[in-house]
Image (tube, helix red, strand yellow):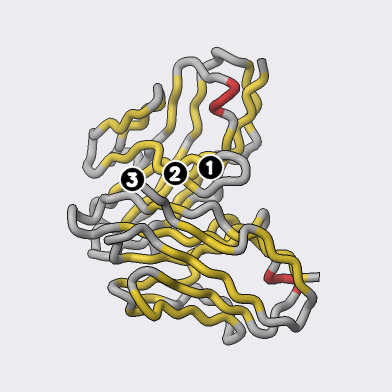
């Protein structure tokens, strides 16, 4: 079945540091890929998405590129802020017609001033 | 616009009691999902509905769990009897299929359930 593997957290960075959170997936065909963010005490929110190979999703300074050859969708940001502290989830939706998402376990990011 | 609304936000009850969690999806959304989040297991899909009909309940852990969607604006997740291992944050999410399969799921703020 489909699966998503994220780097283990927690990740602690200083403000303005570069962020990478690795995500790889296993799926048949060509899934759609997503990053969701969860702030403390809240539900998940869509951060960005990519629906086909080589697509780049971007939002709020975050980027991720759909790499079919490496089955990866790594999240990056050039300069993190304290307000980016949250849990980040990589997810995929399989191509077979289902609307459900398969989530990774999440990576907790803490940004310190 | 109102988002997905869940109630209660927090629930503390004793083992063996019935627990009912409620969800109001975003108006016009035709998919509704129930998730459970724990530190050990992460985010798990329990069940989802399309147009009020359950499509996949394979994630429901056991017969103590049941979910209903009597109309397009309301769903419940019930646990009877509850056990301490059911303690978790339960999320409801909804989405709209009308613009394709890649529309985002919109999550509520969750119900934090503690079974003593």
Chain label for disc 1: A
> Residue A84: horizontal and vertical position, in percent?
54, 27
Within the image, what quadrant is residue A76 found in? top left
Residue under label 1, please give it.
A38
Q: Residues within 10 Å of mark 1 (few under 14, many from 20)?
A: many
Q: Residue furthest front?
A: B1
The reply to whether callout 1 and callout 2 are in contact (CB within 8 Å) is yes
Residue under label 3, please give it.
A33
Separation (CA) of disc 3 from disc 2 = 14 Å
Quadrant (top left, top right, bottom left, bottom right) of the C terminus of chain B? bottom right
Mark 1: secondary structure: strand
Chain label for disc 2: A
> Residue A77: horizontal and vertical position, in percent?
45, 22
Above or below for A61 versus B94: above
Residue in the foreground of this view, choosing between B26 and A12: B26
Within the image, what quadrant is residue B62 found in? bottom right
């Amino acid at each position: 079945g489909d699966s998503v593997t994220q780097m283990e957290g927690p990740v602690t960075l200083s403000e303005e540091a570069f962020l990478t959170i690795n995500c790889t997936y296993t799926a048949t065909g060509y899934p759609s890929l997503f990053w969701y963010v969860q702030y403390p005490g809240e539900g998940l929110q869509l951060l960005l998405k990519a629906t086909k190979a080589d697509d780049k999703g971007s939002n709020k300074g975050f980027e991720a590129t759909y790499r079919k050859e490496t089955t990866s969708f790594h999240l990056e940001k050039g300069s993190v802020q304290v307000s980016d502290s949250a849990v980040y989830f990589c997810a995929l939706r399989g191509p077979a017609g289902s609307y459900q998402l398969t989530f990774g376990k999440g990576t907790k990011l803490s940004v310190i001033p | 616009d109102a988002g997905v609304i869940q109630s209660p936000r927090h629930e503390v009850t004793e083992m063996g009691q019935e627990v009912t969690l409620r969800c109001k999806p975003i108006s016009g959304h035709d998919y509704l999902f129930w998730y459970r989040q724990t530190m050990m297991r992460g985010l798990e899909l329990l069940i989802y509905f399309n147009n009020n009909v359950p499509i996949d309940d394979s994630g429901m852990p056991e017969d103590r769990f049941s979910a209903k969607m009597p109309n397009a604006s309301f769903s419940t997740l019930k646990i009877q009897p509850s056990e301490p291992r059911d303690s978790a944050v339960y999320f409801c999410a909804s989405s709209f299929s009308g613009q394709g399969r890649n529309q985002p799921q919109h999550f509520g703020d969750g119900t934090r359930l503690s079974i003593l």
